[in-house]
Image: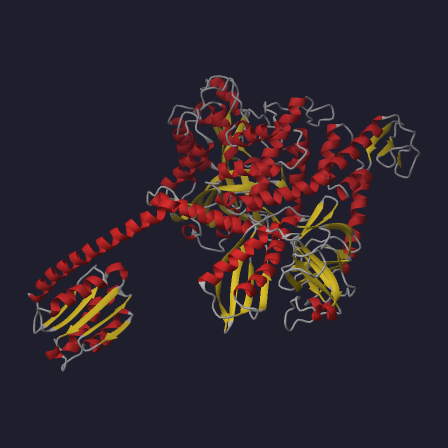
């Protein structure tokens, strides 16, 4: 390690150290964790993935786990685990940003022993890494051991004390100073009220200003800070010794197998090492997790995006005991810390398959994201910014946690969608909050006495502010529970965010009323949930009224939810009106989103049952029945579909022009990525395909108008210029899509009955490329093609490939490539010719050697690691000089080649084909041939000698 190592070097040195100690290095577990009672929670400790081993439910087999980074012993493991603490018992969310060390996501470095080593090795290795490798000043290092207090379980951990004492004495330090006792609260770990448990020993470091090495008086003073609340002496590593089982009767009995479970906060260790400049400066040390290169790349990108600079300031507690930023720089620095921390949490969670949502841990992620977006306003971000930081995080962390690099685009997409959703209501919510604050700070009317001592304040502020008359006659103003509920329900503000904003302006919230309103909403949701029908098939849907489709002319609309349907693992909504095209006529259905306040419900697909549209949602959350929501079609996706649909019509026309009017459509598929078109015809020639592609692109460049109109079916049927699909059922009124001519005059050069969506002009298609033409059935061919950006991307890829190939053969650009390839092919043919001549010469030499070993007119031998061509060459060389029986084997390339040759005078006795048929199955293969020459092969190299032995039996040699 360098004098002041980077965070990456510190992490790697930990893993390398335990690699030396024969530990298997396992990848981090998922940040999502399902507890033993079935609750979906976050992984908050490094040991979670090892619990089944600790409980004896599976054997210690970590060296066989998928994705192992280094294979060591099956009973030893080490890793760096992504942990999230943002809810439940371990909830650091509200403290993030206000100090130097709280995080919602952190890395836990750890090492484990499963019935392998125990206290002596664990403590010795901890000492070796911290003192000898990392060079922590030993006079500033303290260890704690378990000393039970009154009523605490088990006995004093004298064994741990003795091991530590030996280490401190070895460098002349007094163990009575450097080993500190701790009771059950500080130094005894339990998985639960019952089950595996045991004492723990912790390593603490004194960070008080002064020289790196402390005199004895300073050492004694430092010992008094251990296990206290002073941040100048902090724990860095906890070693848990799981040696007891806690029984229901309160007794503790030794476990048959003893385990070690350790955890070290990675960001904290980095802050100590880097903050003291490699332990050289404790006088001016800046011990902050955020002042390390763990966060610096994100801060640098934030500065680049916002123009604001991080200055490491910290807010102080106000008179109410709340830590609130006051100065402008304090507000900026809090925002930097919150945004950077929350970016890490959300990115890793999404990479591990957990997305922001409306319930459980998914809502925790949504709260975290909206908190970050709110702090973005402090840095004057008005447009989505959060997702732009993902690239930096992926580049920084992708080597250690490859999933964040692999899923980078998905992470950005999810964050951008969530941020856009909250941005729609954030400013409105802030304005409403500020209106309430102004009302609370104005002269209030004297509140009337209610049963609970509370009343709504009067005047223009309505129900935004509530006042409470206290027992002493004074009045306390607070923000109303109705305001907090409205911010939550309509504007998407998590309650803890509203609480945070209220603390910053020094106002309490009427929490009781908020809770009452929340309970009423939950009851309404339960009632609405009863209306959600569980169905087995779409035929059971209750809504029979046709959905009004307005998607030809509109991509968004305010619509009403008529029904919510749950089918197996899918949730769909029925709307009164839809802008989404439902899948039919070969065109895939639209995707999009439903928006209700700050909540977004992504639509993954749209289909129809009869004349009723089903909008399938991602996930199981849906807006309530009777809710009015905004429906928005995914416009880029729709436009890509339209390009492929319109060009399908042009392709149909071009087929008639180039091939035959009888080349009629048999089916088609139109998606954002490509089109397929089935038609009856013989295989098309290369020239026909070229002509079709050229014709289609000519019509695109012409930018002919595309229009549609509805006419009676009988009128359309009578018009010979309008194409209809044979066998398709049409109503009395049909839609004709026309390309060229005057709009809606039915005089275009392409006219088809079609209900799909299309471009407004052929020029919108941009580019058309044929991908393939093949048979799909007798007399039916299929063309696959791409258009628009997909065609451009393919052309760009082809150009890049040509450029790459030109570079590989030293061609001066693509134009010179053909000449270079011709030269290379000529050289290759010459080399092959020379190689064959050389092989023939070598085979002739080998044949001569084999003749010298012949016995009874027979040569049977294994030529070894050579290929089949070489073996054939040897056999051919033998033909002219040896009139006997030859059986050769070759094992080059990991497979077996068998050659047999029998001279004419011996064929009455045995034939070459029968020899091969007899021996090839032995090597797991087959073969055969003529009486004079045959060949075969197989894959079992180990059985070659057995096959040749069988050949001797067949020949009688």
Q: Do we see residue 149 in this rendering?
A: no
Q: Name which residue lies at 6% across and 65% down.
A: 852
Q: Do we see residue 430 in this rendering?
A: yes
Indicate the position of residue 654 as horizontal and vertical percent values: 56, 61
Q: Number of marks in the image?
A: 0
Report the quarter where the C terminus lies.
bottom left
Indicate the position of residue 900 as horizontal and vertical percent values: 18, 72
In screen coordinates, is 861 left or right of 691? left
Looking at the picture, tell me which residue is in the foreground, 78 or 566: 566
Q: From the viewer's perspective, is residue 607 above or below residue 154? A: below
Looking at the picture, tell me which residue is in the foreground, 671 or 656: 656
Q: Residue furthest bottom?
A: 908
Looking at the picture, tell me which residue is in the foreground, 344 or 105: 344
Q: Residue furthest left?
A: 852
Q: Quadrant of residue 750?
A: bottom right
Q: From the viewer's perspective, is residue 170 above or below residue 157? A: above
> What colouring method underlies this structural image?
secondary structure
Q: Name which residue lies at 58% across and 63% down.
A: 652
Q: Quadrant of residue 112?
A: top left
Report the quarter where the N terminus lies.
top left
In screen coordinates, is 281 left or right of 667? left
Indicate the position of residue 362 as horizontal and vertical percent values: 64, 47
Looking at the picture, tell me which residue is in the foreground, 601 or 518: 601
Indicate the position of residue 258 as horizontal and vertical percent values: 45, 47
């Amino acid at each position: 390690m360098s004098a002041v190592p980077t965070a990456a070097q510190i992490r790697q040195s930990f893993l390398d150290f335990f690699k030396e100690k024969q530990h298997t290095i396992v990848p981090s577990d998922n940040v999502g964790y399902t507890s033993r009672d079935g609750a979906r929670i976050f992984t908050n400790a490094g040991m979670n993935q090892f619990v089944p081993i600790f409980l004896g439910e599976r054997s210690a087999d970590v060296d066989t786990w998928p994705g192992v980074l280094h294979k060591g012993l099956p009973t030893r493991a080490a890793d760096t685990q992504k942990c999230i603490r943002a809810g439940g018992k371990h909830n650091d969310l509200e403290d993030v940003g206000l100090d130097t060390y709280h995080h919602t996501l952190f890395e836990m470095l750890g090492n484990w022993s499963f019935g392998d080593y125990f206290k002596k090795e664990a403590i010795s290795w901890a000492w070796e890494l911290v003192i000898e490798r990392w060079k922590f000043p030993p006079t500033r290092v303290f260890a704690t051991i378990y000393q039970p207090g009154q009523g605490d379980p088990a006995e004093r951990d004298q064994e741990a004390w003795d091991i530590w004492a030996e280490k401190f004495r070895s460098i002349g330090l007094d163990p009575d100073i450097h080993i500190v006792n701790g009771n059950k609260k500080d130094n005894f770990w339990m998985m639960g009220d019952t089950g595996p448990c045991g004492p723990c020993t912790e390593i603490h470091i004194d960070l008080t200003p002064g020289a790196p090495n402390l005199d004895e008086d300073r050492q004694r003073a430092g010992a008094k800070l251990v296990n206290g609340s002073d941040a100048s002496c902090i724990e860095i590593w906890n070693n848990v010794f799981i040696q007891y089982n806690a029984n229901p009767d309160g007794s503790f009995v030794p476990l048959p197998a003893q385990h070690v479970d350790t955890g070290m906060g990675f960001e904290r260790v980095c802050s100590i090492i880097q903050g003291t400049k490699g332990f050289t400066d404790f006088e001016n040390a800046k011990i902050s997790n955020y002042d390390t290169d763990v966060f610096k790349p994100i801060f640098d990108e934030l500065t680049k995006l916002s123009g604001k600079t991080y200055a490491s300031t910290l807010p102080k507690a106000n008179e109410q005991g709340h830590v609130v930023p006051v100065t402008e720089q304090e507000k900026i620095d809090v925002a930097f810390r919150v945004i950077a921390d929350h970016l890490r949490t959300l990115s890793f969670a999404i990479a591990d398959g957990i997305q922001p949502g409306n319930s459980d841990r998914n809502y925790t992620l949504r709260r975290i994201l909206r908190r970050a977006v709110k702090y973005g306003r402090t840095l004057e971000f008005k447009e989505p910014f959060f997702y732009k930081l993902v690239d930096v995080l992926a580049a920084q962390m992708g080597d250690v946690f490859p999933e964040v690099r692999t899923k980078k685009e998905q992470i950005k997409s999810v964050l951008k969608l969530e941020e856009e959703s909250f941005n729609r209501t954030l400013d409105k919510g802030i304005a409403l909050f500020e209106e309430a604050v102004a009302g609370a700070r104005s002269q209030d009317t004297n509140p009337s006495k209610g049963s609970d001592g509370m009343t709504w304040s009067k005047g223009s502020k309505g129900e935004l502010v509530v006042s409470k008359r206290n027992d002493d006659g004074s009045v306390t103003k607070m923000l109303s529970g109705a305001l907090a509920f409205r911010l939550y329900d309509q504007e998407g503000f998590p309650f803890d965010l509203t609480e945070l904003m209220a603390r910053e302006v020094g106002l309490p919230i009427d929490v009781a009323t908020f809770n009452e309103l929340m309970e009423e909403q939950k009851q309404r949701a339960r009632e609405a949930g009863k209306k959600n029908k569980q169905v087995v098939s779409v035929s059971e849907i209750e809504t029979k009224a046709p959905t009004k489709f307005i998607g030809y002319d509109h991509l968004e609309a305010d619509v009403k939810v008529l029904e919510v349907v749950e089918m197996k693992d899918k949730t769909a909504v029925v709307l009164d009106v839809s802008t989404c095209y439902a899948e039919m006529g070969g065109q895939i259905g639209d995707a999009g989103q439903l928006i209700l306040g700050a909540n977004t419900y992504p639509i993954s697909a749209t289909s129809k049952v009869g004349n009723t549209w089903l909008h399938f949602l991602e996930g199981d959350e849906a807006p309530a029945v009777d809710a009015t929501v905004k429906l928005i079609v995914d416009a880029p996706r729709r436009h890509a579909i339209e390009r492929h649909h319109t060009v399908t019509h042009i392709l149909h026309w071009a087929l008639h022009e180039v091939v035959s009017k009888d080349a009629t459509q048999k089916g088609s598929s139109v998606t954002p990525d490509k089109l397929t078109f089935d038609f009856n015809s013989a295989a098309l020639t290369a020239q026909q395909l070229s002509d079709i592609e050229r014709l289609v692109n000519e019509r695109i460049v012409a930018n002919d108008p595309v229009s549609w109109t509805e006419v009676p079916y009988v009128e359309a049927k009578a018009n010979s210029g309008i194409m209809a699909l044979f066998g398709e059922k049409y109503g009395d009124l049909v839609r004709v899509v026309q390309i060229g001519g005057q709009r809606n005059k039915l005089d275009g050069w392409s006219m088809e009955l079609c209900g799909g969506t299309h471009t407004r002009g052929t020029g919108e298609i941009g580019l058309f490329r044929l991908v393939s033409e093949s048979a799909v059935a007798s007399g039916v061919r299929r063309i696959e093609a791409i258009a628009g950006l997909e065609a451009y991307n393919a052309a760009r890829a082809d150009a890049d490939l040509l450029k790459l190939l030109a570079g590989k053969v030293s061609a001066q650009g693509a134009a010179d490539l053909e000449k270079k390839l011709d030269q290379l092919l000529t050289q290759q043919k010459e080399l092959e010719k020379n190689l064959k001549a050389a092989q023939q010469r070598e085979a002739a030499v080998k044949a001569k050697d084999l003749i010298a070993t012949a016995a009874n007119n027979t040569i049977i031998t294994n030529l070894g690691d050579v290929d089949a061509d070489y073996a054939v060459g040897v056999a051919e060389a033998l033909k002219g000089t040896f009139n006997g029986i030859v059986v050769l084997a070759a094992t080059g390339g990991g497979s077996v080649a068998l050659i047999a040759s029998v001279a004419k005078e011996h064929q009455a006795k045995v034939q070459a084909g029968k020899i091969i048929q007899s021996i090839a199955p032995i090597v797991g293969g087959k073969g055969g041939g003529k009486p004079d020459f045959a060949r075969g092969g197989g894959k079992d190299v180990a059985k070659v000698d057995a096959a040749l032995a069988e050949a001797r039996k067949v020949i009688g040699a």
